[in-house]
Image (cartoon, rainbow, N blue to C red):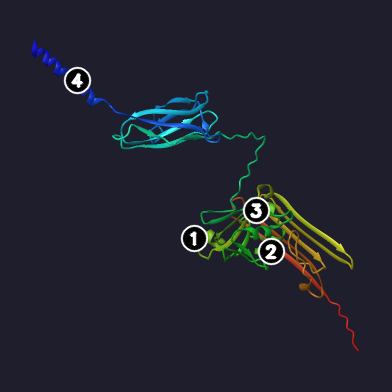
Amino acid sequence: MNKMKKLWWAMFVLCFCCTGAFAQKTIDVTGDIMDEYLNMPLKDVKISLLNPDSTVVVDSATTTYVTGTNGKLLQVVYNIPVKAEERDFLIRATRPGYNEVWQPITVRHVDLISAVRVPTIKMRKEMSLALSEVKVTATKVKMYYKGDTLVYDADAFKLPDGSMLDALIRQLPGVTMNDVGEIFVNGRKVDELLLGSRTFFRGNKKVLMENLPYYTVKDLKVYEKQTAKSEALGYDVEPRRYVMDVNLRPEYSHGYIANVEAAGGTEERYLGRAFLLGFTDRWRYSLLANLNNVNETRHVGEQGHWTPARMPQSMITTRSVATDLDYQSADKQLSNNLSASFTSTTNRQQTNRRYE
């Protein structure tokens, strides 16, 4: 009988020791919650404890309201018991009408502590404003590279009404142009100004720059173009030409565009100019006319100052007309171009002398 009692007592002591050995120690994660603007305790806040990757919720907190003798709320305290092991957590605080708050915490030295105090969580109210109408305007990219081609988007540039193509070219980043109409892109001279990948007025840049309205342009492309002979053979047999290709908007690629300027003054002074550019499915036709006796070299839409000191002392009458006809087949295998021009000038000078 005594042996049985001893056996029972031994089993009881062993169970007690095992229970003590497997008892798990916990640590309290605790802190308080306040309104950031009012600096006052904040009720009805949901506190959750998450893993560092913020995907798995470990536990939710219990909240305690601490009040004074007069019933005034003094503090809102939360408490979350966690397993006593060294690791990191994230605390998430949510409340309707407030911005969500995340607070990282670290549990260390679990053998020496019984609680981890978290800094005060301060929550800020969400700011909302109802607008009747909102207009969002995106900033367009002025230039970009498409392979070896540099493309300028004409929509990204704003010019005064009446401006021509030359005013648009002067605003392109990295592009400069001198008084005789030579164009340089990043210091390299442009050999030819094309219209729709086709030559225009046998490469006369100023005709196109001074008469094509800027609002008709979709984009300008700068690239190295093969000669007609190289394109026909399929490989380069001649040096490529560095070109600037002007592409029109779809609504202006059919039909016609016309510019007309006329003026009259005293002393029988007059000025008249006309420019016509038209398109069909196969043909492109151009007509340019100029008649004036005022020594005028500026064109419609050009910005600048009148400089009489640079004008000739005589009166020059200019009469000129030029046309350009361009044909291209649907398969672009056949093309023909005809250009013709006529110019006549009269220089009239009157000299008066007085001497003794």
Task: Name the N-terminal-most of marks 2 and 4.
Answer: 4
Which amino acid is tagged 2?
A: Lys
Disc 4 crowd, CA 10 A, few/some/many (<14, 14-19, 20+): few
2 vs 4, front mark: 4
Determine which residue is flagged by label 1: 235
Q: Disc 4 designates what residue? A: 15
Residue beneath the point at 33% across and 31% down = 114
> Which quadrant would residue 353 be assigned to in this image?
bottom right
User: Foreground mark, 3 or 2?
Assistant: 3
Q: Are marks 3 and 4 in contact (CB under 8 Å)?
A: no
Residues at circles 3 and 2 in contact by the CB criterion of under 8 Å: no
At numbered mark 1, what does the secondary structure look like: helix, strand or loop?
A: loop
Residue carrying label 2: 206
Left or right: where 347 falls relative to 212:
right
How far from the left and from the top, in percent, is residue 232? 54, 59
Q: Earlier in the sequence, mark 3 or mark 2?
A: 3
What amino acid type is highlighted by mark number 4?
Answer: Cys
Q: Work out which residue is located at the far right of the displayed protein and give it.
A: 356
Q: Provide the secondary structure element on which disc 4 rests.
A: helix
Query: Which residue sits at x=70%, y=62%?
Result: 207
Mark 2 surroundings: few (<14), some (14-19) or many (≥20) residues within 10 A: some
Tag 3 secondary structure: loop
Q: Nearer the viewer, residue 99 or 62?
A: 62
Q: With 177 as the anchor, is 147 left or right in this view?
A: left
Q: Earlier in the sequence, mark 3 or mark 4?
A: 4
Residue at the image position 57 percent from the left and 61 percent from the top: 228
The answer for how far apart the CA atoms under marks 1 and 4 are is 93 Å
Write down the residue under mark 3: 157
Q: Secondary structure at mark 2?
A: helix
In 3D space, how far apart are the residues under numbered discs 2 and 4 (Cα atoms)?
A: 104 Å
| Residue placed most toward the observer, 64 or 320 | 64
Instruction: Give the residue type at disc 1.
Output: Tyr
